């Protein structure tokens, strides 16, 4: 499973979901490899059973509050249990809606996901084990910027030099 093709599928899913759920245009402004610095609130879902890796969607606090407020149809003024659950659910929706296409890219083998984890804080880094390739799509929307990062370690990646 190639990271560029797989992330492109996730980007298309993310853009469609943001329009469908939030009536927002979300467009990619740039891509980066092995990006380490994330925003204040991140939803992370691990791939399990075959493909090793994860999908992270990361938002500045203001963007997360706006999105979850729209999802819940009530304003969110601070990070609380509702916002945490909402960010986890957005990550879950992106993975779930990307599952069929990612499974095709994985030679037809189904991909399974963990439950979402949400990390909150400033200036944190997520480190991946050696041999894991990560690629981020940096989005912009009317509610602010955010990023979607795909990290993969499959048989194709073992032994390959990591790109900076």
Image (cartoon, grey):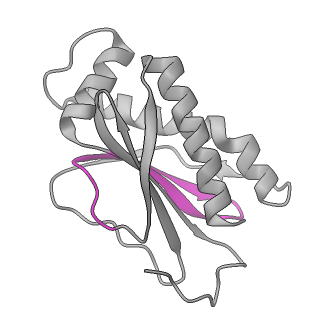
Q: Residue at x 65, y 79 (%)?
A: 157
Q: Identify the residue at the far front of this view.
A: 29
Query: Could one spot residue 104 in this view of the protein?
Result: yes
Which of the image's four quarters has the N terminus?
bottom right
Q: Is residue 92 left or right of residue 82?
A: right
Any part of residue 110 in sight? no
- As drawn, 56 above or below 53: above
**Seen in the image, is 130 located left or right of residue 152?**
left
Which quarter of the rendering shows the C terminus? bottom left
Q: Is residue 57 magenta?
A: yes
Residue at image location 28% in from the left, 57% down from the top: 38
Task: Please give left or right for residue 86 compared with residue 124 in the image.
Answer: right
Magenta region: which residues? 36-58
Q: Position of residue 44 (x, y in %)?
A: 43, 50
Pinpoint residue 26: horizontal percent, then vertical percent: 44, 33
Q: In terms of depth relative to the viewer, which is nearer, 83 or 71?
A: 71
Relative to 72, is 112 above or below? Answer: below
Please tell me whether residue 106 is drawn above or below residue 28 in the rendered image. below
x 23%, y 27%: residue = 65
Q: Residue at x 62, y 64 (%)?
A: 3
Comparing 150 with 80, the one in front is 150
Q: Kindly report the secondary structure that dominates the magenta region of the rendered protein.
A: strand
Q: How many numbered marks have been drawn onto this rendered protein structure?
A: 0
Pick the residue in front: 161 or 77.
161
């Amino acid at each position: 499973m190639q990271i560029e093709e797989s992330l492109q599928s996730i980007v298309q899913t993310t853009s469609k979901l943001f329009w469908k759920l939030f009536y927002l245009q979300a467009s990619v402004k740039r891509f980066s490899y092995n990006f380490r610095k994330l925003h204040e609130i991140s939803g992370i879902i691990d791939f399990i059973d075959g493909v090793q890796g994860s999908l992270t969607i990361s938002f500045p606090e203001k963007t997360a509050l706006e999105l979850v407020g729209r999802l819940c149809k009530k304003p969110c003024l601070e990070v609380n249990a509702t916002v945490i659950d909402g960010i986890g659910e957005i990550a879950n929706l992106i993975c779930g809606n990307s599952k069929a296409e990612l499974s095709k890219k994985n030679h037809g083998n189904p991909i399974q996901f963990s439950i979402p984890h949400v990390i909150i804080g400033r200036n944190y880094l997520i480190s991946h084990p050696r041999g894991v390739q990560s690629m981020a799509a940096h989005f912009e929307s009317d509610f602010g910027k955010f990023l979607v990062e795909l990290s993969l370690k499959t048989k194709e990646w073992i032994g390959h030099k990591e790109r900076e």
